[in-house]
Amino acid sequence: MTRTLLLPFPILAILAGCAQTPAAVPTPSNLPARWEAASPVSTGEIPGAWWSSFDDPVLDGLIDSGQQHNVDLRIAAERVIASHALRRAATAGFFPEIRAEAGVTAARRTANDSAGIGLGASWEPDIGGRLSAAVRAARADTGATAADAEAVRLLLIEEITRAYIDYRLQRALIALTTRTVAAQEETLRITRDRFEFGMASALDVERAAALVSQTRSEQAVASEAADADRFRLAYLLSTTPENMTARLATGDAIPAADPLVVLRSPADVLAARPDIRAATARYAATAARRDGAAGLRLPSLSLSGLVGLDAGGIGSLLDGGTTIASVAAALVLPALDFGRRRAELDAADSQLRVAGLDYERVVRSALQETQTGIVSYLQGQMRERELGRAAEAARRAAALSQLQYREGTLSQLEVLDAARTVYQAERDHARALADVSARLVSLHRQMGVAPAAPVTASGGSGTAQ
């Protein structure tokens, strides 16, 4: 046996050493204090379940189901569980390792048989701070893994919502195309009738027929995109396309929320985003590992102890053998390692600087992404309003073209062109409506907005079935 039992009074000292304050991440300079966007939005509180503003029960159900069954989220939850286990393992290093041992030795040519049983313990006091540094690193790793899981959840909510919005858009385009084809087929029928009576040319008939076929082809494009969105939702929810067909059967409008009236400041975004929390925790873990590397240059102490029985055989052992006991201590002082520990510490210092730079990179990327998202959302709103006006004007122009055509002051080519313009304008406006909603969804994720993770019956964070 090589070490001894841990006494109560060292436990308190070691645990006190474990409770050191984690290293503070260096704050990047030249960070913006406000957003560069002339907008009507103001700062304030944003509801956690922001998707409820779409007032769509189907979407609410999809997000709830996704948070319960998504594979990526369940993987992230398992990683959190594993990180907690590793943290417990690191904490166990403060306490003694107690072992029970038994052994029998039999010699064929001599009578020197022996048997022994014993209880041994070993302990390494944390005089250099290496163990406490390992615990701090494990605790920070747990925080980083939990933040990573939260980032996965926010991204999942965004992906589900955007896929649902696009599915509703494609279904709306299919319906728009169906209505347009029906109107164009009626125009084609009238043109053919006029051709039979010599009031229209064969060119007019072919132009009308070409427009019908061209418009009808757009149905296949929209149907393909809608199926892709349905398959995407089935994957995100870990279910089947048939199940998604049933769940998407109700509702047909493109989800639209009220304009955003609350906006988080840059400081609030930095505090809320899980990727920044993960980078902060990883810096703390790297700093703790750097402390551990520094601790390797300090003396280490190991204590061991053994108590047991030794006898000339198993029978003698049962009758009571010789009681044995031992205590040992070893102090190791680093003497000459040809610069190995110094090199390891230099590498740890460099890794700590890299972790600080990585934190700055994540912070600046988050602010850039959010600033871009704000501008994108505001510009998307302006584009949707203009396209709405364009669609309304196109419908009025088409109605006038029909009137003038019947009066003989306008050719059929101009009528068909007006009808084509209406269809394209309405398609563009529908896409703009969906695009504004999708940009709003991304903006909420970029600002780190989400409610607390749902709790399952097993007491988890809603990331496993």
Image (cartoon, rainbow, N blue to C red):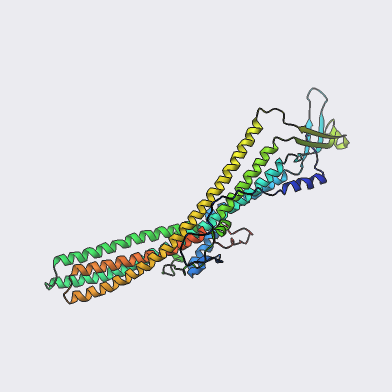
Judge by depth and name the residue closer to the eye, 24 or 248: 24
Q: How many marks?
A: 0
- Quadrant location, the C terminus: bottom right
Furthest residue in direction front, as rendered: 30
Vertical arrangement, residue 214 with respect to residue 92, above or below: below
Is the residue 105 above or below the residue 429 in the image?
above
Q: Which residue is more in the foreground, 229 or 23?
A: 23
| Front one among 243 and 77 | 77
Horizontal side of residue 7 vs 60, given as left or right: right
Name which residue lies at 80% across and 44% down.
10
* Residue drawn at 19 percent across, 73 percent down: 190
Residue lying furthest left in this view?
A: 198
**Residue 397 % position (x, y):** 26, 72
Depth order, front residue of 113/87: 87
Position of 357 with respect to 425 (left or right) is right
x and y percent of residue 242 in the render? 44, 61
The residue shown at (49%, 57%) is 370
Answer with the quarter of the image where residue 309 lies. Answer: top right
Q: Position of residue 167 (x, y in %)?
A: 41, 63
Up the image or down, 205 lies above or below 296; here it is: below
Q: Position of residue 290 (x, y in %)?
A: 65, 41
**Quarter placement of the N terminus:** top right
Residue 163 shows up from this direction: no
Q: Is residue 12 visible?
A: yes
Q: Which residue is found at the position 70% from the left and 35% from the top?
A: 297
Whether residue 187 sits left or right of residue 165 in the image: it is: left
